[in-house]
Image (cartoon, coloured by chain):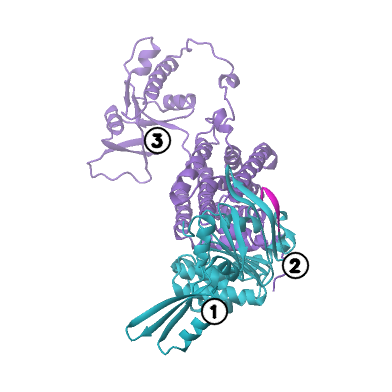
Chain colours: A purple, B cyan
C-alpha cells in the first residue's frame, strides 16, 4: 500500500540506487580502483628524505684542517676530499665511482674489478675542484694559482658560475684576506621571502601527498559527473520526478553520494599513505570540504556532458585549472596570485601545512575559511545549474 | 455526480514561440479510458507533461484527483502512474530492482514484484539486467513500473508504440484491467485501432487544438455511412450489394440476404477513426 513517505526516506532510496549504479559501472569502478592503487604505490616509491647539501669533490687540499675550515665556511656544500685530480676528473666524468669512508675517498674505475672498502659509502658528485699542491702557499703570498673546476655537462650554467665564484672566495680565505665587499650582520644577510624552510624541507613524498589526495577527489568528480550525465541523458530522472520525489530530493541525494564516495576514497588513500595520523580531525574536515567542492563541480560538469567522452572532456575543463594549485605545492613559494585564487588552493595548501609541517586548527583557519566559501559557492552553482537542466528535460 | 479524476480547463502551453497546446478542455472519470489521438507534434505528450507536473501551463487550470497540477502536491503524485514514451529505465539494474526502487519512492516496502512482473509476462526475467531486455520487454517493464503504487490515475504516453502484436496485446489487456479496477486512464496514441479497442471516449488533437471529444461509436455514427455491404455467392459468381439503411426497403433487402443460402459476409460501412480524423483535421495520424 502507498503511504506518506518522508523526504529523508526518499533521499536515502535515491542514494542507495546511485551507489548501486556507481558500483556496477565497470569502467568507472575499474578506473577508481586503479587510481587508488597507483596513487598509493607511487607514494611509497617516492623518496622520503631531502638532501640539502651539494656534494663537491676537492683534491689538492692535503691539510685536513684547511678542508675543515672550508667546510665550516660553506654551509650547504659537502666537500669530499679526493686523493688526486685524476680520480676527481674520472668521477665527475662518470668514468669511475667514488666511495667515501672515514676521512678518505677513493675512485674505482667502472671497468675495474676492485671491490670497495668495507664500510665505504658510494657518493655521487657532479662538481669537482682540483687545487694545485701549492695553492695555499701561492695565494697566501699574494700570487696567482690555477684551479681546475670539473663540472658535469648536466650541471646548469648558474651552478658552474657559482662554483667559479666559490673558488675565488676560497682563494681569498686561504690568503687570509677579507672579501672586497661590505657585508651586513650575520642575521641580516639572508632575507627569506615567505616561510624559511631551510632544514625543514619537504621530501618528494611530502610534496606529492596533496597532489595524490586531490587526484582522488578529482577522479570522484569524473565518476559523479558521468552518473549525473547518464541520468539526464537516459531521462531516468524524469521518471523519478513524477513520483513523490522532488528535484530537491534528487539533488540532495547526488550531493550526498558525491561527498560520501569522495570522502571515503580520500580517507582510504590517506590511511594507506599513513597521512591521517598527525591531525585526523583537521585532515578529515579538509577532505569533507574538498569532497563538497568536487561534488558541486561534478554537478556542473554532469549538467553539460551527454556521454562518456563529452563528460570526460567537460570534466577536464574543470579538472585542469583545479589541479594547478596541487602542482604548485610541489614548489613551495612559487604559487602566484592567480594560482592562490583558485578554489582548490586553500585545500591543497591546508593539506600541505597540516600533513607536512604539522600545522594545527589555529594555523589552518584561514585556509578552512576560504575553502568553505568556495565550497558553498561551487556547490550552490552546481546545484542551480543541474536543477535548471533537469527542469528543462 | 462523480468527481472527475482529471479535469482540464482551457490550458495552453508554448515552447518559445511554438504554441504546443492551445486552450484545450476535457475531463476523465474514474474507470474511464480517454484515448488521446493525434499525430506526432499534436500536443499529446505536452498535455501529459502538464498533467504530471513536469510543465506548468501558461494559462488555464488543470486538476488531477482534485489537486492543482502546478502545486507539486506529493499526495497527488503518490496516486498517479506515468508510462513515458521513452524507455527511461535504469539499465544497470534488474527488473526487480527497478520496481523496488520506484516502489520505495512511494513508501512501499512490501511490493510483490513477482506478481507485477507476472502480469506483464516478465516473471522469468526478474533478476536480469534491463540492458539485456528487448524493446518489447522494456515497454512491458515500463508498464509494470507505472503500476507499482496501484495508481488512481494512469498517464500512458504511446505505451504500445513500435511493439510486436503480442506485446501490444498484453499491454492493452493490462490497461483494460486497470480501468476495470477503477483507474482513470489518459492514453495517448496514434494507433486508431488501439484507441478504438480500448477507449471509452476519444479526443482528436491536432496542432495543439482539440477537434473532437466523444465515444468512438458516436464519432463513427456521426461521420460514417449508414449502409451495409452484403456479399452472396450465386450460381454465376459472387454478388456484392450495398444496402443503405436510410432506405425504406433496407429491412426487406437485408432479410432476403440473410435468408439466402449463399450468404458470405455482411459488413457495416461505418467510418474508421482515422478517416474521421482526416476528415476533421485534414491530416493523417501517422504524420
Circles 2 and 1, Cβ within 8 Å, touching? The answer is: no
Relative depth, front residue between A131 and A322: A322
Q: Chain of mark 2?
A: B
Q: Residue furthest front?
A: B248
Residue A220 is a magenta residue: no
Q: Chain of mark 1?
A: B
- Residue A103's label in the rendered image is 3
Which region is colored magenta?
B56-62
The picture places residue A350, in percent across and down from the top left corner, at 61, 40
Figure check: A17 above or below B267 = above
From the image, tell me which residue sits under label 2.
B3
From the image, tell me which residue sits under label 1.
B118
Circles 2 and 3, Cβ within 8 Å, touching? The answer is: no
Q: Chain of mark 3?
A: A
Circles 3 and 1, Cβ within 8 Å, touching? The answer is: no
The local secondary structure at tag 2 comes to: loop
Q: Residue at x 49, y 79 (%)?
A: B124
Figure check: A122 above or below A26 = above
Horizontal side of residue A150 vs A325, given as left or right: left
Amino acid at each position: 500500500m502507498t503511504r506518506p513517505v518522508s523526504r529523508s526516506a526518499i533521499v536515502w532510496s535515491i542514494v542507495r540506487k546511485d551507489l548501486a549504479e556507481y558500483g556496477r559501472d565497470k569502467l568507472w569502478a575499474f578506473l577508481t580502483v586503479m587510481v587508488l592503487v597507483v596513487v598509493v604505490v607511487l607514494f611509497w616509491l617516492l623518496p622520503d628524505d631531502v638532501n640539502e647539501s651539494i656534494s663537491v669533490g676537492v683534491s689538492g687540499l692535503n691539510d685536513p684542517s684547511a678542508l675543515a675550515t672550508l667546510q665550516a665556511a660553506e654551509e650547504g656544500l659537502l666537500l669530499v676530499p679526493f686523493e688526486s685530480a685524476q680520480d676527481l676528473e674520472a668521477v665527475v666524468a662518470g668514468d669511475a665511482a667514488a666511495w667515501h669512508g672515514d676521512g678518505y675517498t677513493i675512485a674505482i674505475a667502472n671497468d675495474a674489478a676492485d671491490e670497495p672498502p668495507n664500510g665505504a659509502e658510494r657518493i655521487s658528485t657532479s662538481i669537482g675542484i682540483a687545487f694545485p699542491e701549492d695553492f695555499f702557499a701561492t695565494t697566501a703570498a699574494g700570487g696567482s694559482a690555477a684551479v681546475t673546476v670539473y663540472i658535469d655537462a648536466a650541471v646548469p650554467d648558474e651552478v658552474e658560475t657559482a662554483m667559479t665564484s666559490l673558488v675565488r672566495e676560497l682563494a681569498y680565505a686561504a690568503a687570509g684576506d677579507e672579501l672586497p665587499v661590505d657585508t651586513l650582520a650575520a642575521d641580516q644577510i639572508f632575507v627569506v621571502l615567505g616561510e624559511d624552510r631551510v632544514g625543514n624541507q619537504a621530501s618528494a613524498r611530502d610534496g606529492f601527498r596533496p597532489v595524490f589526495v586531490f587526484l582522488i577527489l578529482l577522479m570522484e568528480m569524473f565518476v559523479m559527473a558521468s552518473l549525473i550525465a547518464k541520468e539526464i541523458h537516459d531521462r531516468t530522472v524524469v521518471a523519478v520526478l513524477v513520483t513523490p520525489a522532488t528535484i530537491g530530493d534528487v539533488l540532495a541525494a547526488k550531493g550526498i553520494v558525491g561527498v560520501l564516495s569522495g570522502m571515503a576514497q580520500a580517507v582510504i588513500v590517506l590511511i594507506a599513505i599513513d597521512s591521517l595520523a598527525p591531525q585526523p580531525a583537521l585532515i578529515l574536515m579538509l577532505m569533507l570540504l574538498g569532497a563538497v567542492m568536487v561534488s558541486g563541480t561534478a554537478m556542473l560538469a554532469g549538467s553539460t556532458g551527454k556521454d562518456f567522452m563529452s563528460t570526460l572532456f567537460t570534466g577536464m575543463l574543470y579538472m585542469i585549472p583545479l589541479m594547478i594549485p596541487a602542482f604548485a605545492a610541489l614548489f613551495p613559494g612559487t604559487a602566484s596570485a592567480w594560482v592562490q585564487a583558485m578554489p582548490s588552493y586553500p585545500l591543497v595548501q591546508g593539506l600541505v601545512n597540516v600533513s607536512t609541517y604539522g600545522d594545527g586548527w589555529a594555523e589552518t583557519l584561514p585556509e578552512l575559511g576560504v575553502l568553505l566559501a568556495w565550497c558553498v559557492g561551487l556547490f550552490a552553482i552546481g546545484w542551480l545549474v543541474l536543477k535548471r537542466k533537469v527542469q528543462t528535460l | 455526480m462523480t468527481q472527475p479524476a482529471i479535469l482540464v480547463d482551457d490550458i495552453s502551453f508554448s515552447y518559445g514561440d511554438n504554441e504546443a497546446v492551445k486552450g484545450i478542455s476535457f475531463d476523465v472519470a474514474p474507470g474511464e479510458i480517454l484515448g488521446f489521438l493525434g499525430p506526432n507534434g499534436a500536443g499529446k505528450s505536452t498535455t501529459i507533461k502538464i498533467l504530471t507536473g513536469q510543465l506548468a501551463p501558461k494559462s488555464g487550470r488543470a486538476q488531477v484527483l482534485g489537486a492543482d497540477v502546478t502545486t507539486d502536491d506529493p499526495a497527488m503524485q503518490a496516486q498517479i502512474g506515468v508510462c513515458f514514451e521513452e524507455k527511461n529505465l535504469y539499465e544497470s539494474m534488474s527488473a526487480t530492482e527497478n520496481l523496488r526502487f520506484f516502489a520505495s519512492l512511494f513508501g512501499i516496502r512490501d511490493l510483490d514484484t513477482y506478481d507485477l512482473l507476472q502480469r506483464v509476462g516478465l516473471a522469468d526475467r526478474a533478476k536480469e539486467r534491463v540492458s539485456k531486455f528487448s524493446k518489447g520487454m522494456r515497454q512491458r517493464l515500463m508498464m509494470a513500473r507505472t503500476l507499482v503504487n496501484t495508481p488512481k490515475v494512469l498517464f500512458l504516453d504511446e505505451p504500445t508504440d513500435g511493439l510486436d502484436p503480442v506485446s501490444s496485446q498484453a499491454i492493452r489487456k493490462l490497461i483494460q484491467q486497470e480501468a476495470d479496477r477503477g483507474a482513470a486512464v489518459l492514453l495517448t496514441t496514434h494507433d486508431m485501432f488501439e484507441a478504438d479497442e480500448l477507449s471509452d471516449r476519444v479526443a482528436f488533437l491536432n496542432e495543439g487544438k482539440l477537434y473532437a471529444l466523444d465515444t468512438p461509436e458516436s464519432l463513427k455514427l456521426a461521420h460514417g455511412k449508414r449502409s451495409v455491404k452484403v456479399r452472396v455467392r450465386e450460381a454465376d459468381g459472387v454478388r456484392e450489394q450495398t444496402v443503405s439503411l436510410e432506405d425504406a426497403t433496407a429491412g426487406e433487402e437485408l432479410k432476403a440476404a440473410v435468408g439466402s443460402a449463399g450468404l458470405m459476409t455482411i459488413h457495416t460501412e461505418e467510418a474508421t477513426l482515422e478517416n474521421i480524423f482526416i476528415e476533421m483535421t485534414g491530416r493523417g495520424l501517422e504524420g
